[in-house]
Image (cartoon, helix red, strand yellow):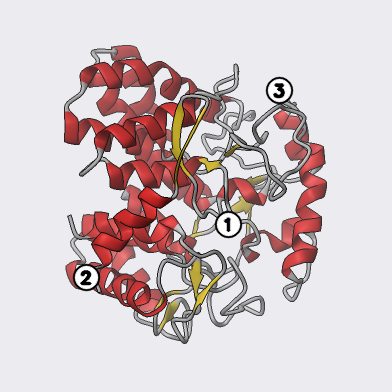
Amino acid sequence: MDIEMLAREVLQKNRRTTSGFQYTVPSPSTYPYQWLWDSCFHAIVLASYDPDAAKAEMHSLMSKQFQNGMVPHMIYWEPGELHVYEWGVIGTSALTQPPMIAYAVWEIFRHTQDLEFLTQIYPGIIAFYRYLVTERDPRGANLASIINPDESGEDNSSRFDSVLGIKPDISYWDHIEVRKKLYSANIGEHPDVSARMRQHFWVKDVPFNSILVKNLRILAHIASTLQDEVGEHFATQHAGLIKAAMREKMLDKGVFWSTTGSEYTKLHVETWAHFAPLFADLYTHEEADALLKEHFHNDLTLRGEWGIRTVSRREESYRPDGFWRGPVWLAPHWFIYKGLQAYGFVEEANEIRELTRKLLEKSGFREYFNPETGEGCGAEEFTWGALYLDMVD
């Protein structure tokens, strides 16, 4: 089976053009709109063989940026009946998603050296990251907050159960109803984020902030390339501040935990989020070694036969087919692969790449996979499998 050819075919089949904007939908039947971090994944893969499509993907994504700098996590280019909620804005959601934009843009520039593209898109990008380190950090603690589990990209992850006041065995559909209440609490393009956090949902999430650190470092490279010393200083400074704050407020027992509230109460639920800081070089090498022993090479926690579980097997909430409550997802695989590579864990990185390939060969381009059987679940013709191309470049 030619996985690389199939990956390109999925991206091509899912490409759309609306109102002059070109973008890629994650799945034609299940996710027929544009999503923020999905588009970043698409652009990262496309950058190496179809850079014009990658540029179009990012221009499309940035075209709906709010005046305050936030980039919405959904754009309804052709409104349908799926995933339609009352956001209080026209044509987009009122939430954001993990900030992978700088990474994707830099990958495009790395492959093309297109300075004009970089110059055009830069003002919107830096406005987005300024929004995250100011409005999403109203207390100046140097940690960005999410105001809804959907902003983590992991909609029903059990990391957030205690914050939502729900039980480990909650159903998928009941979880959606809980999150709908949060949607109505965050209506509009300019909600009072600080008040919303205090009243409804206040989480400093480990993957979100890890991704933010990595992207701020890349933003510094972009600013330097464009000779924007102020922007370079901003990005470098905040990457360092967030790293320090994460180590101070999130690190416990050798791993990072998401936190909630003004006291930064740690959310002690074992999920793949323990691996996310590898992506941003937040662990020492000694800590990374210990992490791998406890969770990468341990089938009682996060290592399943077919990949990394999104929730540890020893958590009460673990469900091998439970959306983000246990199954393997290939974006986390990609983040883990990149982190392992950066730390020099070549053997483990190759394992993740090979497990990803085997999942795609066994079950095709599915949304997520049972970590015990490799069975594909959820949406079909799902684009995240194309991230495998970035593991074999």
Per the image, label 2 sits on a secondary structure element best described as helix
- The residue located at (61%, 78%) in the rendering is 318
Residue 29 tag number: 1
Q: Marks 2 and 1: CB-CB under 8 Å?
A: no
Considering only order in the chain, which callout, 1 or 2, is on the residue closer to the N terminus?
1
Asked where in the image residue 236 lies, by quadrant, the reply is top left
Residue 365 picture location, percent across and down:
42, 66
Taking 200 as reference, is 237 above or below it? Answer: above
Residue 350 tag number: 2
Name the amino acid type tagged 2.
Asn
Name the amino acid type tagged 1.
Ser
Rounded to the nearest angstrom, the CA distance separating label 2 from label 1 is: 32 Å
Per the image, label 1 sits on a secondary structure element best described as loop
> Which residue carries the number 3 mark?
190
- The residue located at (34%, 52%) in the rendering is 279
Per the image, label 3 sits on a secondary structure element best described as loop
Q: Is residue 358 visible?
A: yes
Quarter of the image with the N terminus in it: bottom left
Badge 1 density bin: few <14, some 14–19, many ≥20, Cα 10 Å: few
Quarter of the image with the C terminus in it: bottom left
Residue 311 picture location, percent across and down:
54, 71
Rounded to the nearest angstrom, the CA distance separating label 2 from label 3 is: 44 Å
Name the amino acid type tagged 3.
His
Q: Marks 2 and 3: CB-CB under 8 Å?
A: no
Q: Is residue 391 left or right of residue 377?
A: left
Taking 250 as reference, is 104 above or below it? Answer: above
Q: Nearer the viewer, residue 7 or 143?
A: 7
Residue 334 picture location, percent across and down:
35, 59
Closer to viewer: mark 2 or mark 1? 1
Q: Is residue 141 left or right of residue 223?
A: right
Rounded to the nearest angstrom, the CA distance separating label 1 from label 3 is: 31 Å
